[in-house]
Image: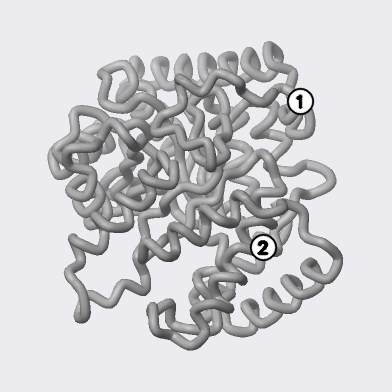
Amino acid sequence: MQNEKINRRKFMRDAAVGAAGIAAGLGLTARALAARQPAKTNTSGILNYNPEMEYRRLGRTELMVSAVCLGGHWKRVDVMKQDFDQNRREVVSRCIEVGINYIDACSIPEVCAYSKALTGRRDKMYLALSGGEVRNENFRTAEKLMQRIDSLLLKSNQEYTDLWRITCLEPGGRHSFDTACEIAAALEKAKKQGKARFGGISSHDRRWLKFMVEYFPQIEVVLFPYTARSKALPKDSLFDALGKCDAGAFGIKPFASNSLFKGSSALDDPNADEDDRRARMAIRYVLCNPHIIPIPGLISPRQVDNVAKAVKERRQLDLAEARELDSMMDEAWARLPKNYQWLKNWQYV
């Protein structure tokens, strides 16, 4: 027991020293990071490169990922009216065609569905795996977490994952410091064993994510909510920590859990064109922040084409568009179900 305490003390000290070294060595702020990313003229290293797509550097992973990526959720796929596996294959195929090169699978069903949809073309996409992890109290030690990644790799028939992003409690600050240490230890071990190229976490807790990124250098990528009403805090922003530590960031819920839309997302819905327009405006808004990459759930090739179109459209909203989007978000907030009211806490990041 005494040796375990000493080892944990040493681990925490080494992690703190590592984090401090990253911060001192990079000396970056969120605002300075943009200047560190000149336009790349050599595109040979970009996976599944398409000249019509924009690509962004995912922090110190050095991966160049598409400006919009594929989130794992498929909330509005009507499995009663179509073949689900075929739907996922068609969506992934269209993503590959337009130059999208990253999929975020954040549950066991998503891990199985997307690994299946990528069969024969795994070299076209980065694939991130996650399976609930420390939201389950039985997986809050490094040993148990390593069992989880082994299970994820087995279920997905993968030898490794490009990003193992451990899914944490939405209010991540409820995790103990010991659990945080176990998360970091598992991410480090997975990289050393070749099971994950990079490591990260997801949570809905801004302050806790800031602490985790600054304290644990094992955390290279984070995922958190970022809607068409989100903006960086003038001081003490999470983006300042991301810049200082050169960590990558993916934004979930860019459409406010679909509350932005008027229709059902069905192809024959009378609101389809209007909802496509709303989606593009939201993506344009999010992309104005150069430090985040939105990962919406997309349920049809049409929706894939729509977000790809948003990437090519004029980025900055004019005054009339900004007012209109603000009004749309008022409607979205009014439509938010009770279990998504927490999204309103992400107006400032």
Q: Identify the residue at horizontal 77%, vertical 53% (top origin).
A: 316
Quick one: SS at disc 1? Answer: helix
- Residue occupying the point 49% across, 52% down: 295
Visible in this render: residue 342?
no
113 over 57 or under it: above or below: below
Q: Is residue 107 above or below residue 299?
A: above
Query: Looking at the picture, how far across and down is residue 312, in whole percent?
Result: 61, 50
Q: x and y percent of residue 222 in the render?
A: 52, 40
Give the position of the N terminus as an image quadrant: top left
- Local packing at callout 1 (Cα closer than 10 Å; few below 14, some 14-19, many 20+) is few
Left or right of 155? Residue 133 is: right
Q: Residue 60: image x %, image y %? A: 55, 23
Q: Is residue 272 left or right of residue 154?
A: right
Horizontally, residue 58 falls left or right of residue 75, namely right
| Label 1 sits on residue | 35
Disc tally is: 2
Residue 228, numbered circle:
2
What's the residue at 21%, 45% (across, down)?
115
Q: Residues within 10 Å of mark 2 (few under 14, many from 20)?
A: many
Q: Amino acid at mark 1?
A: Ala
Q: Residue furthest bottom?
A: 270
At x 20% / y 80%, what residue is drawn? Answer: 80
